[in-house]
DNA sequence: TTACTTGCAAACTATTTGCCACCTG
DNA sequence: CAGGTGGCAAATAGTTTGCAAGTAA
């Protein structure tokens, strides 16, 4: 389970190029939820010859291959994180954009309970829950 | 609380124009979560002389004035709904984009519990919760 | 070698804005 | 009448893509 993103990239039969290696490493070492611009910045520090277009393409490829997970927290840009990390959810501070990770077994049960109550078939569907606080 | 969006628009001292009246009406009558393009389409059916730019400006003004609430469900465009509706949360089907509304007291408690556990000050902060299902 | 990748710039999509005519209060 | 408002098109921000050159296997 401690396979690196790069390991999984190879395992998937994806061609391993210098830029993919670098981008994988950057994401491996990122403890936060970087957007493409940030990933590009960090990657550029390791290898000046990586274009933003390549970051976009790589990150999309990795996501489609299940190596990364894409997150959209409502600020208009996508963020990415290693798909192999332990499951967790996010709380976003709307004002500051701060991303707070948390784990709570309750939320899983909650989703299942709600889906069941609504007669929604969870199998084969990926659901995402958006909750706001009552004013 | 059965005030219309238009009523609240006037109450806020906002200038009431034909296009604002129409856009307010469209949102009033929309039971779903329309994006700007959809709002523009529906408004155009009532008054052919409303530009998309005006919808963007109006919807932003209404949101800043607290008449509407903006939602971003991860598909890249903002959606709006009447801010006076009873509190509820959303479950999004990632594949189909379907928006499922639900109400569950548990989720409020959950947010407060998590924030407290993390030592996060809820006062003065608007938090939004993003939950995915464990694979 | 050969198909897959990359860089660059052009193209796209969603949204914002400058400018000037127009309308509400 | 005066200042807020709307239309139009140009400008932005984030992301995608066509094409020719480069590279992994």
Image (cartoon, coloured by chain):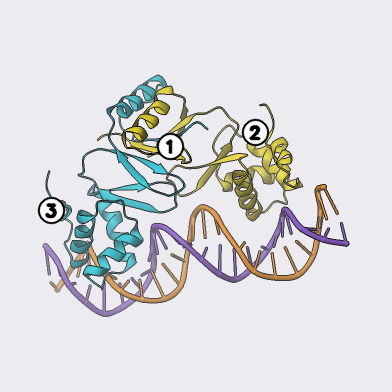
Chain colours: A yellow, B cyan, C purple, D orange
Q: Which chain carries label 3?
A: B
- State whether residue A96 appears in this view: no
Occupied quadrant, residue B49: bottom left
- Label drawn at residue A29: 2
**As rendered, which of A47 and A19 lies closer to the eye?**
A19
Query: Could you classify mark 2 by the number of other residues whose Cα lies within 10 Å: few (under 14), some (14-19), or many (20 or more)?
Result: few
Q: In this view, does A80 lie above or below B55?
A: above
Q: Which chain carries label 2?
A: A
Q: Closer to the N terminus: mark 2 or mark 1?
A: 2
Report the residue at 35% width, 62% height from top.
B37
Tell me residue A31's x, y (percent).
Answer: 58, 31
- State whether residue B36 appears in this view: yes
Tell me residue C23's x, y (percent).
Answer: 17, 72
* Residue with the most extreme top position: B117
**As rendered, which of A6 and B21 lies closer to the eye?**
A6
Report the residue at 30% width, 60% height from top.
B39
Q: Mark 1 lies on which chain?
A: A
**Label 1, on which residue?**
A122
Report the residue at 27% width, 64% height from top.
B42
Query: What is the spatial separation of the Cα atoms under label 3 and label 1, in whole angstroms?
Result: 41 Å
**As rendered, which of D12 and A128 lies closer to the eye?**
A128
- B39 left or right of A96 in image: left
Are the residues flagged by discs 3 and 1 in contact, CB closer than 8 Å? no
Front position among marks 3 and 1: 1
**As rendered, which of B61 and B27 lies closer to the eye?**
B27
**Label 3, on which residue?**
B7
Q: What element carries label 3?
A: helix
Query: What is the spatial separation of the Cα atoms under label 2 and label 3, in whole angstroms?
Result: 53 Å
Q: In this view, does A8 lie above or below A77?
A: above
- Label drawn at residue A69: none
Q: What element carries label 1?
A: loop
């Amino acid at each position: 389970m401690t396979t690196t993103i790069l390991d999984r990239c190879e395992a998937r039969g994806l061609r391993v190029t210098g830029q993919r290696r670098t981008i994988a490493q950057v994401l491996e070492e990122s403890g936060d939820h970087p957007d493409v611009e940030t990933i590009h910045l960090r990657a550029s520090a390791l290898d000046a010859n990586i274009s933003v277009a390549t970051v976009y393409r790589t990150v999309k490829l990795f996501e489609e291959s299940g190596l990364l997970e894409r997150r959209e927290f409502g600020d208009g840009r996508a963020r990415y994180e290693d798909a192999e990390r332990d499951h967790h959810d996010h709380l976003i501070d709307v004002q500051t954009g701060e991303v707070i990770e948390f784990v709570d077994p309750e939320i899983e049960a909650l989703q299942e309970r709600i889906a069941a109550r609504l007669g929604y078939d969870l199998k084969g569907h990926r659901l995402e829950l958006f909750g706001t606080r009552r004013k």
